[in-house]
Image: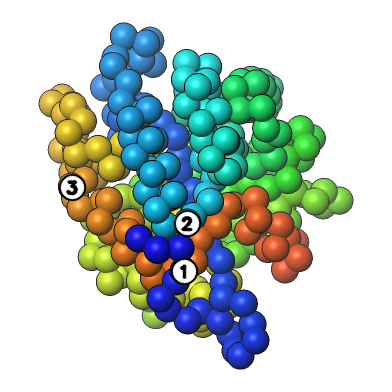
Amino acid sequence: MHGTSSVDHSAGEGIEPIVNGMSVDVEDWFQVGAFENVISRDDWDSISCRVESNVDRILDLFDEAGIKSTFFTLGWMAERHPVMIRRIADRGHELASHGYDHARVFNLDRKRFSEDILKARQLIEDASGRRVTGYRAPSFSIDKRNPWAFEVLAEQGYAYSSSVAPIVHDHYGWSEAPRFAFNPVPGSQLVEVPVTTAMLGNRRVAAGGGGFFRVLPYAFSRWAIRQVNSVEARPAMFYFHPWEVDPDQPRVANAPLRSKLRHYTNLKAMAGKLSRLADEFRWGRCDDVARREALRAQPFDVTAPMKELAA
């Protein structure tokens, strides 16, 4: 892996190549949404964690590539693995919040959400010694059902969020949301930078990483990110999880077949695909991407769907 992209993504001579946002959602194999109905949160502390060795592998991978990235981390992880959190920060990466224990935001009310992100932020900041300014909702669970979540983030002083998947999906999605950075709260500097989508004809398709990156051929991700960089002249926002580079993780026998297919497919291929991605594109921290994108963000009335329903 190399720090310098082998592909020219500049919009023209003398213009710097686009730097995309690289991010890791720090949760372990038993904390994912796919298994939430078969593995209880009450059992988490009795399950052997594999996150530290996987995060160390990712840190080494990023060092080799010359990449600084953002680790959206559960407060639950920071509480139990503070040395790992400090190690991430000391190697130049951004620590951001992924909530406390992976509760989907649309399952919380405003008060519980506020308490959740406050607790997570304090734990991550205490462990890392760094200020947390970014947030990503577990399972991209901010959508048209809970636009008030952006107000809570603004009230708590977050600079940016990357919590919206502007697509149709069976677990999440806000298809009416903009594909690129927008301001969700009037009078606030908070900027939302959605996870990346590409256009296939008139249809938006998910192209920001995770299971889509693992399961689909690498050529799809290359095409999608090139489209975003070269046609749209915008940065991609990419994510993956530590458990995705761990093909030897335990198997959950009683999980639904669809969940198992989503979770375990192509785990052995993930590290190699990430190496190719690092070679072909330029990557940086999400706070830096959000800061640049804030200059181009457009207002978006996140309450519009609720107003339409009320009418």
Dot 1 amino acid type = Thr
Residue at label 2? 66
Instruction: Give the vertical position of 281 relative to 243 (above or below).
Output: below
Q: Secondary structure at mark 1?
A: loop
Mark-to-mark CA distance, 1 and 2: 8 Å
Residue at label 3? 268
| Residue 4, disc | 1
How many C-alpha atoms fall within 10 Å of the one at disc 1: few (<14), some, or many (≥20)?
Answer: some
Residue 274: x and y in percent read: 33, 56
Compared across the picture, whether 285 is left or right of 197 comes to right
Q: Are marks 1 and 2 in contact (CB under 8 Å)?
A: yes
Question: Can residue 39 be seen in the rendering of this structure?
Answer: yes
User: Residue at point 64% right, 42% down?
Assistant: 134
Dot 2 amino acid type = Gly
How many C-alpha atoms fall within 10 Å of the one at disc 2: few (<14), some, or many (≥20)?
Answer: some
Residue 303: x and y in percent read: 70, 49
